[in-house]
Amino acid sequence: MDDEEHQPSFSVGRWLPLLMLLAAMAAAFGMGWHSYLTFKTIGLNHESLKSFIEANKALALLLYVLGYAAVVALSLPGALVMTVAGGLLFGWQLAAPATAIAATVGATIVFSIARTSLGEPLAAKAGPWLGRLREGFQGNALSYLLFLRLVPAFPFFVVNLAPALLGVPLRTYVIATFLGIIPGTLAFSVAGSGLASVIEAQNRLYMACLARTPAASEADCPYTVDTSALLTPELVAAFVLLGVVALIPVAVRKWSKRHAEA
């Protein structure tokens, strides 16, 4: 009887963080907050943002970190825009470490909630095949997570969730996430720091178009910042190579085990 009375409160406590996160995500998408995470928003407000940062650098950096963490935690599209914008507004020297910390915090929030609400119940009810998968992943969690973080073929929110379902320890998850996102964060922050002239040129073109045609629509006067050069084949190849390097310890362990058994 006592067990039955305690069960509902346990269930509520387990599911409440996930329900709150889902509600916050629904509210963010419903209010269209993600629509502001564009180069157009950053570009048209570039001067005012720079002025605010110059007058309130510490506060601005804190707001950036909190905003970035929220974007990651709520799985809103726009993390790439924010990373590039961080380099543009703060310079890559400040933006890169701030972005890496913010992304790690946001990802850890998702991981912790998912592990509590989904991972532990799943482990309790999992069949043998999932149990073996969890054991294999946990045995090489750091290497596998580094690979998933480094190779830009896997959606960020998926990599945030999967380790929670596979029983990865929190400490391992945080270390792998932080280290794994550093190369991409650094690359895009540096790229963003060199976009000031591109933003200024696009602002002039956009304003000139609106002046010629006051009633112009978005199609008539598009605001475009060419980001195709940010993710070059060479950069992707470098990330993949780093990911392969991260898997070398796994390959060495398996080879050593087979060699020992032989």
Image: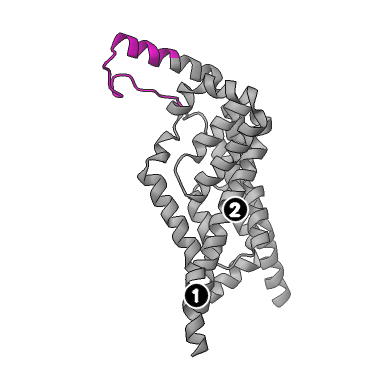
In the picture of the structure, the residue carrying the numbered disc 2 is: 147
Residue 131 place in picture, x, y as percent: 54, 76
Tell me: residue 95, above or below residue 15.
above
Magenta stretch encompasses residue 208: yes
Picture residue at 39% right of the left edge, 16% below the top: 206
Q: Is residue 194 visible?
A: no
Question: Mark 1 and mark 2: span between their CA atoms?
Answer: 39 Å
| Front-most of residues 226 and 47 | 47
| Front-most of residues 144 and 165 | 165
Q: Residues within 10 Å of mark 2 (few under 14, many from 20)?
A: many
Residue 189 place in picture, x, y as percent: 60, 32
- Please report the bounds of the magenta region as a residue range: 204-226
In the rendered structure, which amino acid carries the disc numbered 2?
A: Phe
Q: Nearer the viewer, mark 1 or mark 2?
A: 1
Q: Find numbered disc 2 in the image and state the secondary structure of the residue it sits on.
A: helix
Q: Residues within 10 Å of mark 1 (few under 14, many from 20)?
A: few
Picture residue at 54% right of the left edge, 72% below the top: 120
Q: Find numbered disc 1 in the image and state the secondary structure of the residue it sits on.
A: helix
Residue 7 place in picture, x, y as percent: 49, 80
Residue 44 place in picture, x, y as percent: 45, 22
Picture residue at 66% right of the left edge, 67% below the top: 254
**Which is more N-terminal, label 2 or label 1?**
1
Residue 48 as seen in the image, left or right of residue 40: right
In the picture of the structure, the residue carrying the numbered disc 1 is: 9
Magenta stretch encompasses residue 31: no
Tell me the quarter of the picture where residue 56 sits. top right
Q: Main secondary structure of the magenta part?
A: loop
